[in-house]
Image (cartoon, rainbow, N blue to C red):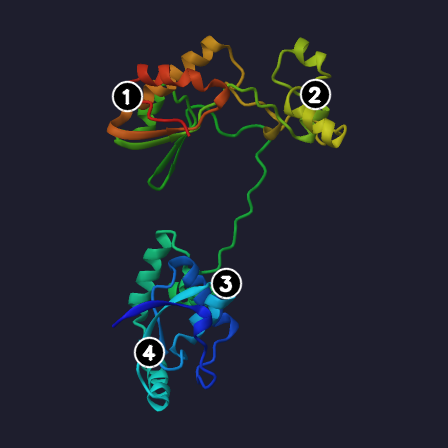
Amino acid sequence: MNIRTVRIDEIHTDPTNARRHGEKNLDAIGASIRTFGQVEPLVIQKSSGRVIGGNGRLEVLRRGGAAECDVVEVDLDDTQARALSLALNRTSELAEWDDDALASALSYLKLENVDLGSLGFDDVDLSELLDMPEVIEDEIPEPPDEAVTRPGDLIVLGNHRLLCGDAGSTVDVDRLLAGNPIHLCNCDPPYNVRVEPRSNNAIAAGMSSFPASEARRHGGLKHHQAFDVARQGAKKATHARLRAKDRPLANDFVSDDEFARLLRAWFGQIGRVLLPGRAAYIWGGYANCANYPAALKEAGLYFSQAI
């Protein structure tokens, strides 16, 4: 079989083609070609340049502005060409899907983040094949004004454990892990960048984690709070009490020495419990990123790179 590349304007679709390509079909073909490229050559009649197999693909390539495509030429007369066109379409129709094998393949590809729409399957198809129930999102309540959880509370959720405690405490970390090995750590400790609460209530009340004298010089506001007021105007308080979302972050506005101590404590626990050769992903703020390498090195952790 000799595959060659020809100009799109040298070939044409078959006006007698018994196979009709609706927009849904053309969209599916287009998604496949955009994802994988043209991996299957068109079959054309050598004497006329008429497409015997692949009329839908040719239409999609034209719409996409392609100048060339790959073809296989067959030396057939008109009668043989029409017969082959029907055979190519009909023989593919006679095959049947193994639904279990298809569902297994789709499930695997879905886990690998493959766009199943590019394979020609729509939401209805996927729902039937994968038996995916309708997802009804739970309503997430607003956090209470006063925290219910107290330091030392351990919440067990199946195989998952959640501790309200100090990530720099050996006692707390050991209690949380209960002897389990740690293969990967993903953590997001405070950045020490003075993130201000930005709710209407916090801004209106001038709630700031900065010292009172400094906050007063800026009308009770600082950083992003002031930006919000400049863009949107003065805010009206909506609540008499300081709510959870109004509160500044703990350990996000401390001295350099205290922040260095906290980093050594947090990273020291990671280095202590992480299995050799395993990885830790640590989210941080660029304003203080220079503090991280020394604390990581002291904890016996290799600072690979910052992204």
Identity of the residue furthest to the left in this view: 276
Say which of 59 and 48 sits in front.
Answer: 48
Q: Which residue is painted at 32% across and 76% down in the image?
A: 73
Tag 4: amino acid: Ser
Q: How far is mark 2 from mark 4, CA to CA?
A: 71 Å
* Crowding near the residue tagged with mark 2, few <14, some 14–19, many ≥20 C-alpha atoms within 10 Å: some
**Circle 2 sits in a helix, a strand or a loop, which is it?**
loop
Q: How far is mark 2 from mark 3, CA to CA?
A: 59 Å
Query: From this viewpoint, is residue 174 visible?
Result: yes
Q: How far is mark 2 from mark 1, CA to CA?
A: 42 Å
Q: Which residue is painted at 49% across and 56% down in the image?
A: 135
Instruction: Provide residue 52's location: percent of width, then percent of height.
Output: 38, 80
**Mark 4 sits on what residue?**
92
Instruction: Tell me whether the residue at label 1 lies in contact with that at label 3, contact meaning CB atoms closer than 8 angstroms.
Output: no
**Mark 2 sits on what residue?**
206
Q: Nearer the viewer, mark 2 or mark 4?
A: 4
Q: Is residue 179 positioned above or below 209 on the image?
A: below
Say which of 119 and 52 sits in front.
Answer: 52
Instruction: Provide residue 305's location: percent of width, then percent of height.
Output: 36, 26
Q: Is residue 250 left or right of residue 80?
A: right
Which numbered tag is attached to residue 272? Answer: 1
Q: Nearer the viewer, mark 2 or mark 3?
A: 3
Q: Which residue is painted at 74% across and 29% down in the image?
A: 235
Q: How far is mark 4 from mark 3, CA to CA?
A: 28 Å
Instruction: Provide residue 291's location: percent of width, then percent of height.
Output: 42, 15
Q: Earlier in the sequence, mark 1 or mark 3?
A: 3
Q: Which residue is painted at 48% across and 10% down in the image?
A: 256
**Mark 3 sits on what residue?**
65
Q: Is residue 69 positioned above or below 109 on the image?
A: below
Q: Earlier in the sequence, mark 2 or mark 1?
A: 2
Q: Nearer the viewer, mark 1 or mark 3?
A: 3
